[in-house]
Amino acid sequence: MGPGVHVTAWGADAALYPRASQPPGLVRELDARFGVHPGFETYDCGWHDPKRLDRFTGACVTGAGRRADIAVEMMHRFPDWELFLMVMSEAHMASEIMWHGVEPGHPLADFDPHARARLVRVFTAIDDAVGTIVAAAPEDAVIVVFSLDGMRSSPGDVPSLVLLPELLHRHAFGTPKLRDIDAEAWRLAGCPPLLPRRGRPWRVDLNERMVEPPSEPWTHRVPGYHAARLSPLGRRIQKLRKGMEIGVLGIPVPPECTADPETLDAVPDSADEFLFIGNYREDRRAMRAFALPTFGGAYVRINLEGREQSGIVPLDEFDAECTAVESLIRACRDVRTGEPIVESVQRLGGADPLDPNGDRYADLLFEWSRPIDAFEHPDLGIIGPVPLNRSGAHSDRGFAWVSGDGLTAGDVPMHSVLDLPPTIVRLLGDDKPLPPAGAPIPELIGTRASL
């Protein structure tokens, strides 16, 4: 945390940073006055359980209203602020889980006829919250409502986190790590979307399909997942027993973390710990290529000698191995449609994969062609099917609306997201130092036209 007043992870979708505040004690005070966000940690709500989705939707609506009330309180309590920034996670929460409600071509489009209505409820609550915040802002404030990315139909969770690592594992070792189901019977039935068995959370269901399931039950980093199906009375009992609030999905909302900011900033974060692909981590050292954690397109890294701790691919075989991995994956077809699963492949990094100054997360990036729950390789056979997870994913098309005194209505051409921070800084005043990347949008700063 830098200077100023901060509240972090209040109502977070997937809290990768503790619920904390500067000054200390502020989160605890806000919780007591306004209540916690009842939708805390909804990352694995799931599209397949209408009752949970109803509770989740109500939590987003309530949370958006409380978030707006907290914003008004903070603006009034700390009136000397120059920049007030609030993140609203409700749109992200709801869109990732229920995007099939507005995407007619998605395999889940006909599964839940109420998904669209739930999304409308959430976005209406967000609109109301923005209105509350704007009405309370000073008259001379410039209002910027923005998202650095947009939303689209998600192809990524299952092929990137499950099917691809399983394919690479079977290619490397000749054995499955994920148990097969009767894929031919599924295909003869018309390839209906699979539901997690008995309505369990997606990750729990997949873990139980492992040939050797994890010894510890998965809880998405916070205890209490098995309370998810408790009745309202059961959740109240859990609240008394655990001494903390319990969200609508049974996830305990942790109290404010009182550690100092330097300690909190130093805590490492690994997506392996809570993404299904982490089940394949132990096998990477013996594989020539392996898949990496991601929230979208699939990343593959070559197990290169001199770069990886247990590298086995000589440098002179690096390019050939990249080509072999690309050929392996391009040979796969979507079982549901028979079409290629890959839309594009990109080689990442510079010419030298051993460059110590390079910022190279992976060597190959695969973008998928559509939502995929099973694919077939001509030699390795069918991988999947498995239940789909998120139906919505991030896109690279964000938006911004800017309004305030001196701004006139109009449209601005598309700009890089890197241009938004320096634009906001320049709107604060001409004497503020600009960020190192991006440039102020001239249509806003020069002519004062609105976005």
Image (cartoon, rainbow, N blue to C red):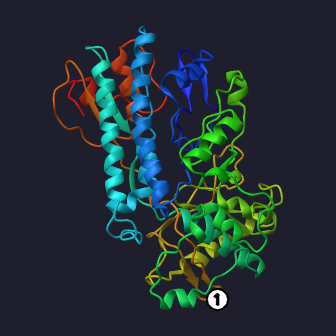
Q: Is residue 243 above or below residue 310?
A: above
Q: Is residue 208 above or below residue 217?
A: below
Find residue 209 and report its image quarter. Answer: bottom right
Relative to residue 264, is residue 54 drawn left or right?
left
Depth check: give the residue in front, 258 or 282: 258
Give the residue furthest to the left. 409
Residue 88 locus on image (x, y percent): 43, 36
Element type where label 1 sits in the image: loop
Where's the C terminus, which quadrant?
top left
Residue 206 locus on image (x, y percent): 65, 67
Residue pictured at 70% horizontal, 78% vertical: 179
Depth check: give the residue in front, 256 or 437: 256
Label 1 sits on residue: 379
Residue pictured at 64% horizontal, 26% vertical: 256
Residue 279 locus on image (x, y percent): 73, 62
Give the residue furthest to the front. 233
Relative to residue 260, is residue 14 drawn left or right?
left
What's the residue type where badge 1 is placed?
Asp
Relative to residue 338, is residue 209 drawn left or right?
right
Residue pictured at 47% horizontal, 82% vertical: 191
Q: Is residue 447 above or below residue 179?
A: above
Crowd tier of the residue under label 1, counting other residues whose Cα lies within 10 Å: few below 14, some 14–19, many 20 or above: few
